[in-house]
Image: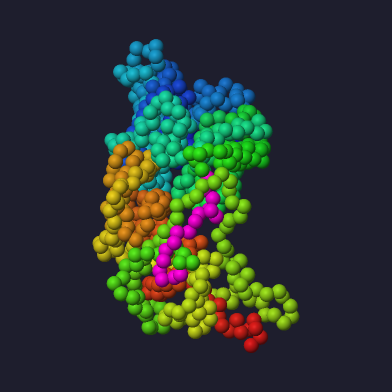
């Protein structure tokens, strides 16, 4: 008889392979257990973790519970109370249905399950190690079910190496909890990290109140309702009109039949609804889709977050039109900001009153800028350059502008220097526009601003084009980095009336660890209440009108890092520069342009922004001569 190389895998290996798809990290295990609790009609769900969920996880609910017979088979693969036939897959009314979650969690942990039904006199418990029952016993627990996970991935050490820090894993769990809490505002959620309360969602809430608990009261207050139906698809929920919240991170929460999902089609539809307004803030929306069961399929991936729609175009149009129409409804409390109607604020620096400009004020210098005389860039010494341009308060209207976009550098160069091609014209190619290797370090007397985005000046070798946003980022980055490394705080100005800052539950869990560095950067924050801080001081050179926006943007950049609780000095400085630099479209005076150029040339790396974008580009004089056949 021939020997075979193909053989069935042992059951424990099969279970670990399945666990790899279902239980990627602590957050995915908690997601599965919360969904089970919701399917059991729980009205209270408690989540407790230790060390980012790596050491222990407790998920406890007050749902229907399991009797002893169900308890003894619930941890076996492909056992479920939610499906009886293949036909049921097309009419799912529950969050879970695969019968894989508990078996997958048990396979890679030490798991204790305790459950009691309403008509049972006592609770029953089972303890498993690596999916194998170790002991059974009775308990005096109340009605419902609890899952206590210890030493997750104890038998899969390689999996542990792919986990993030305790803070990062706790943050991922919080994101999972808040998404499920938003989808179920009638259920109470309590989330604790190392014994500390992080998130509480009170039961019996309406959706707006739950959004306030999860994302912040300010966001919930500014949202407008969405209610629309098209092609058999109903879209409901809330969205923030463009320009109201100056956030940098999209916060999109999508649901189908109340199931939290992720879908790129819906994301594109929401982004498209924001595009006509030309705003730089990212979308914030909580949307629920209701459609026929046969029009979508959630049985795409074991994590059940991805869905497939039968007609993606119908979904795109329904979501896009729903959000678009919500923004266009008359609503005096939530007006739409139109960027082209924002007036300029006069700021006089010796220019004529007929030509008001927005200025960069409060430059940190006791004398005129000493202009470097060396021709080698790396011989320059750092000097300081002031803070962002102050923006004017917005006007409000009801419709988006017809046209608005940030000028593209390639378009500007083409418009300035390209001529109709013929046999006598030498075309100017992008290769002709190159970063300069040497710069005349004495700033010329004349600058002009191109599209309120680029500074243009002459040096001995041709024309220099300077990206004002990239240049200012470089200046502010080195200023902030010097401050952080030298332990000398940036100057701050106290506010006469503190500003209230609402933060999300995720931000509130991390901000206490960031307060010392925020103080060094000039932001003085004090805890005022749950998910609310008082902003009592801001950097001296930062206009108050931009302080809150800059702070939220600073949070957004820091939270995107791998270790938001303890970000590097470079990440802080980069986030600070991005949050506070002047923007494309900000008008500068000649004096301000001159000072910016002097400050840029005095930095350690004047050729690029902290993010790697070029700050300077030269159009050589030789190329200009060729254009004119000289």
Q: Which one is nearer the viewer's eye here, 248 or 613?
A: 248
Q: In which quarter of the image is the N terminus?
A: top right
Q: Where is residue 445 in the image (x, y as percent from the top left)?
A: 45, 79
Q: Relative to residue 137, is residue 294 drawn left or right?
A: right
* Residue at 42%, 25% in the rendered image: 204
Q: Does the magenta stretch include residue 350?
A: yes
Tell me where residue 489 sits by quadrant: bottom left
Between 211 and 253, the residue placed more toward the observer is 211
Dominant secondary-structure state across the stretch colored magenta: loop
Outermost residue, front side = 353
Q: In which quarter of the image is residue 149?
A: top left
Point 39% across, 31% down: residue: 201
Residue 464 location, x and y as percent? Answer: 51, 76
569 vs 152: above or below: below
Frontmost residue, 279 versus 559: 279
Whether residue 577 is visible here, answered yes or no, is yes
Q: Residue furthest left?
A: 487
Residue occupying image coordinates x 66% and y 77%: 427
Find the residue positioned furthest to the right.
Answer: 423
Would you say residue 304 is visible in this rendering? Answer: no
Where residue 91 appears, x then y in whole percent? 60, 25
Q: Does the magenta stretch include residue 510?
A: no
Q: What stretch is highlighted in magenta?
A: 336-352
């Amino acid at each position: 008889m021939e020997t075979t190389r193909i053989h069935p895998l042992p059951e424990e290996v099969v279970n670990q392979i399945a666990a790899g798809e279902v239980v990627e990290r602590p957050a995915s295990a908690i997601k599965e257990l919360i969904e089970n609790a919701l399917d059991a009609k729980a009205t209270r769900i408690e989540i407790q973790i230790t060390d980012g969920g790596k050491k222990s996880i407790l998920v406890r609910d007050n749902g229907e519970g399991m009797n002893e017979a169900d308890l003894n088979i619930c941890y076996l693969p492909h056992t479920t109370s939610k499906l009886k036939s293949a036909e049921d897959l097309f009419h799912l009314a529950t969050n879970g249905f695969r019968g894989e979650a508990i078996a997958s969690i048990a396979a890679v942990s030490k798991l204790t399950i305790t459950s009691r039904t309403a008509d049972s006199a006592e609770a029953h418990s089972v303890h498993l190690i690596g999916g194998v029952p170790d002991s059974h016993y009775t308990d005096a627990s109340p009605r419902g079910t609890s899952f206590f996970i210890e030493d997750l991935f104890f038998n899969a050490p390689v999996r542990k190496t792919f986990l993030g820090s305790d803070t990062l894993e706790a943050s991922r769990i919080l994101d999972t909890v808040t998404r499920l809490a938003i989808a179920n505002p009638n259920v109470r959620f309590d989330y604790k990290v190392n014994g500390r309360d992080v998130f509480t969602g009170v039961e019996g809430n309406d959706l707006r109140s739950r959004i306030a608990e999860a994302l912040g009261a300010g966001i919930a207050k500014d949202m407008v309702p969405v209610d629309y139906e098209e092609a058999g698809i109903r879209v409901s929920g809330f969205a923030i009109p463009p320009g109201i919240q100056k956030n940098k991170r999209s916060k999109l929460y999508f649901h189908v039949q109340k199931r939290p999902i992720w879908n790129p089609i819906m994301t594109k539809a929401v982004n498209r609804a924001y595009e006509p307004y030309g705003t730089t803030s990212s979308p914030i929306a909580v949307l629920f889709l209701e459609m026929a069961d046969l029009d979508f399929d959630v049985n795409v991936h074991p994590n059940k977050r991805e869905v497939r729609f039968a007609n993606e175009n119908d979904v795109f149009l329904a979501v896009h039109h729903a959000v678009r129409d919500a923004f266009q409804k008359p609503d005096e409390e939530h007006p739409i900001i139109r960027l082209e109607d924002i007036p300029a604020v006069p700021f006089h620096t010796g220019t004529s009153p007929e030509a008001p400009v927005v200025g960069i004020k409060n430059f940190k210098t006791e004398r005129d800028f000493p202009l470097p005389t060396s021709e080698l860039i790396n011989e320059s010494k750092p000097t300081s350059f002031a803070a962002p341009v102050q923006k004017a308060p917005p006007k409000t209207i009801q419709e988006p502008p017809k046209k608005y976009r940030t000028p593209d550098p390639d378009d500007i160069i083409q418009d300035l220097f390209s001529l109709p091609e013929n046999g006598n014209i030498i075309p100017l190619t992008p290769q002709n526009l190159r970063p300069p290797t040497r710069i005349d370090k004495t700033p010329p007397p004349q600058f002009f601003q191109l599209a309120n985005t680029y500074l243009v000046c002459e040096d001995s070798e041709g024309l220099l084009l300077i990206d004002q946003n990239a240049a200012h980022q470089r200046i502010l980055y080195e200023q902030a980095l010097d401050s952080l490394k030298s332990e000398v705080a940036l100057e701050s100005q106290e506010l006469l009336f503190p500003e209230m800052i609402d933060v999300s539950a995720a931000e509130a869990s991390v901000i206490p660890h960031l307060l010392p560095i925020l103080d060094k950067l000039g932001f003085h924050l004090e805890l005022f209440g749950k998910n609310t801080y008082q902003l009592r001081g801001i950097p001296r050179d930062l206009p108050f009108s931009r302080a809150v926006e800059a702070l939220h943007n600073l949070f957004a950049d820091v939270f995107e890092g791998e270790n938001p609780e303890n970000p590097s000095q470079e990440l802080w400085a980069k986030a600070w520069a991005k949050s506070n630099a002047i923007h494309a479209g900000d008008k500068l005076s000649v004096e301000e342009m001159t000072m910016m150029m002097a400050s840029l040339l005095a930095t350690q790396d004047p050729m690029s922004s902290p993010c790697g974008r070029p700050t300077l580009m030269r159009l050589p004089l030789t190329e200009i001569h060729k254009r004119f056949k000289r």
